[in-house]
């Protein structure tokens, strides 16, 4: 070893790199074997070849086993052992916790494969990208499929999880059509999504559901499921103009404030006037929703009505349809208004969903698309920031819940 290192100055760059890689692999293999044997010694209560009282079992040969880490594939001489047990059989086979039975890859490698898949990389490209890292380890299409397939287990646990430990103050609810290539045909699948905001301002994905439409019945199934799993005291729901969604939210949480998305309403206003008036309508409408106070907003509202009542009555009628729920955000801390005035936040998430799914080409079924969306959140590839005004949100939520009778002063003090 010393001579080899001494002679490295005579090596070419490629030879030095190869020498270093081989030496690291050799050392890593030794370390893995030592680590496993130390774990076994601890389980047996005595080190190898040591005799004495207190032995918890005995070694029972060894076997060759391959294991792949981020440093490549290693052939390890894996010890076998039998542990004494106080049951009828009196013994059981020892299994390593560091490298579990049947494990063939480290969690780092599997995470890299999953992240590659979620970023839109197909199996062939994953193999190409990771081949230098895995140094000879096989990575077949079926292997990648099995690893990615484990997302199903995580997803099923997630979608049924108890939410009573999640203190959800604000709900963003929105539906979008997810275009998937299924059986060689592009299908548009409605997905109903719910994202919650905790009193500290952090956001959490609560629900993703495939439905045949965005009807009231479909949305009621979502909101009732959320309530049934523990979302009991939200004080605000930010939604678009879907009447079925509005009714389901109010039916599930009768006390809840509703903020109609101001951006969606502007887009709806455009359908009631000629294109040449778009900029003028936008300016008049923004005078309402970007006012400094509710009083100023109401003044701009009246001016809008007066200006457009005769020339574009449909425009005013559409504005009236939004009602006071276009201005709900004025009842909340000023620092928060930017975040709760529209559904832009959840719209941006939906846009990212579409972009990521589009890169996958085709998926075997609609459930696979849903699991992919979940995984983008679960594995941190889509990250969210705290809501604006997060410092003011907590105290406001507590006071608002007390006003609504959802909590008592005694509960608040506790």
Image (spheres, rainbow, N blue to C red):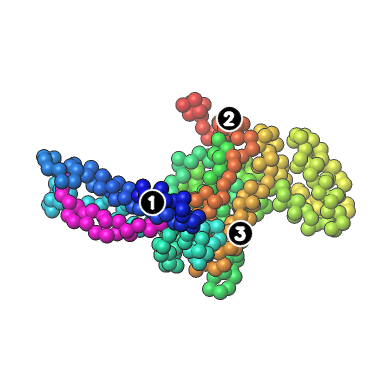
Given residues 68 and 220, the one toward you in this image is 68
SS under mark 2: helix
Q: What stretch is highlighted in magenta?
A: 56-82
In the rendering, at what x and y percent does residue 79 appear?
Answer: 23, 53
Q: Tell me, yes or no, if residue 53 can be seen here.
A: yes
In the rendering, at what x and y percent does residue 308 appear?
Answer: 86, 49
Q: Which of marks 1 and 3 is nearer the N terminus?
A: 1
* Residue drawn at x 53%, y 45% as measured from the top left: 204
* Residue drawn at x 85%, y 49% as measured from the top left: 280
Q: Nearer the viewer, mark 3 or mark 2?
A: 3
Given residues 218 and 383, the one toward you in this image is 383
In the visual, does 121 lie left or right of 389? left
Mark 1: few, some, or many residues within 10 Å (few <14, many ≥20)?
Answer: few
Please, what is the dominant secondary structure of the magenta stretch?
strand
What residue would you read off at disc 1? 4
Residue 354, labelled with which disc?
3
In three-dimensional space, the C-alpha distance between marks 1 and 3, rounded to whole angstroms, equals 54 Å
What residue would you read off at disc 2? 395
In three-dimensional space, the C-alpha distance between marks 1 and 2, rounded to whole angstroms, equals 68 Å
- The outermost residue toward the bottom is 184
Q: Which of marks 1 and 2 is in front?
A: 1
In the rendering, at what x and y percent does residue 295 appear?
Answer: 77, 34
SS under mark 1: helix
Mark 3: few, some, or many residues within 10 Å (few <14, many ≥20)?
Answer: some
């Amino acid at each position: 070893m010393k001579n080899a290192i001494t002679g490295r100055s005579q090596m070419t760059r490629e030879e030095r790199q190869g020498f270093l890689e081989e030496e690291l692999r050799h050392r890593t293999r030794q370390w893995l074997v030592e680590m496993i044997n130390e774990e076994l010694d601890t389980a047996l209560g005595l080190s190898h070849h040591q005799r004495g009282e207190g032995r918890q079992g005995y070694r029972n040969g060894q076997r060759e086993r391959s294991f792949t880490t981020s440093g490549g594939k290693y052939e390890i001489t894996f010890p076998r052992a039998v542990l004494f047990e106080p049951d009828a059989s009196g013994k059981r086979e020892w299994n390593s916790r560091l490298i579990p039975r049947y494990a063939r890859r480290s969690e780092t490698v599997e995470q890299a494969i999953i992240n590659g898949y979620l970023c839109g990389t197909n199996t062939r490209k994953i193999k190409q990208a990771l081949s230098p890292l895995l140094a000879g380890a096989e990575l077949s299409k079926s292997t990648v499929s099995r690893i990615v397939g484990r997302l199903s287990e995580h997803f099923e646990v997630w979608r049924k999880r108890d939410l009573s430990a999640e203190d959800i103050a604000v709900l963003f609810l929105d539906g979008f059509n997810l275009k998937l290539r299924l059986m060689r045909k592009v299908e548009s699948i409605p997905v109903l999504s719910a994202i919650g905001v905790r009193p500290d301002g952090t956001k959490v994905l609560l629900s993703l559901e495939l439905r045949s439409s965005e009807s009231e019945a479909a949305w009621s199934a979502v909101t009732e499921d959320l309530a049934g799993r523990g979302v009991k005291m939200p004080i605000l729901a930010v939604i678009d103009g879907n009447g079925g969604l509005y009714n389901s939210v109010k039916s599930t949480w009768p006390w809840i404030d509703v903020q109609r998305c101001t951006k969606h309403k502007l887009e709806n206003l455009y359908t009631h006037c000629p294109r040449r008036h778009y900029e003028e309508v936008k300016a008049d409408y923004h005078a309402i929703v970007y006012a400094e106070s509710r009083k100023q907003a109401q003044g701009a509202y009246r001016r809008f009505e007066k200006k457009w009542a005769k020339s574009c009555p449909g425009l005013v009628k559409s504005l009236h349809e939004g009602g006071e729920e276009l201005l709900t955000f004025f009842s909340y801390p000023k620092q928060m208004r930017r975040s709760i005035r529209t559904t832009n936040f959840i719209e941006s998430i939906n846009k990212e969903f579409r972009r990521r799914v589009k890169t996958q080409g085709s998926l075997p079924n609609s459930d696979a698309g849903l699991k992919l969306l979940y995984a983008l959140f679960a594995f941190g590839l889509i990250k969210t920031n705290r809501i604006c005004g997060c410092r003011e949100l907590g105290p406001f939520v507590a006071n608002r819940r007390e006003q609504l009778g959802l909590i008592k002063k005694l509960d608040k003090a506790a």
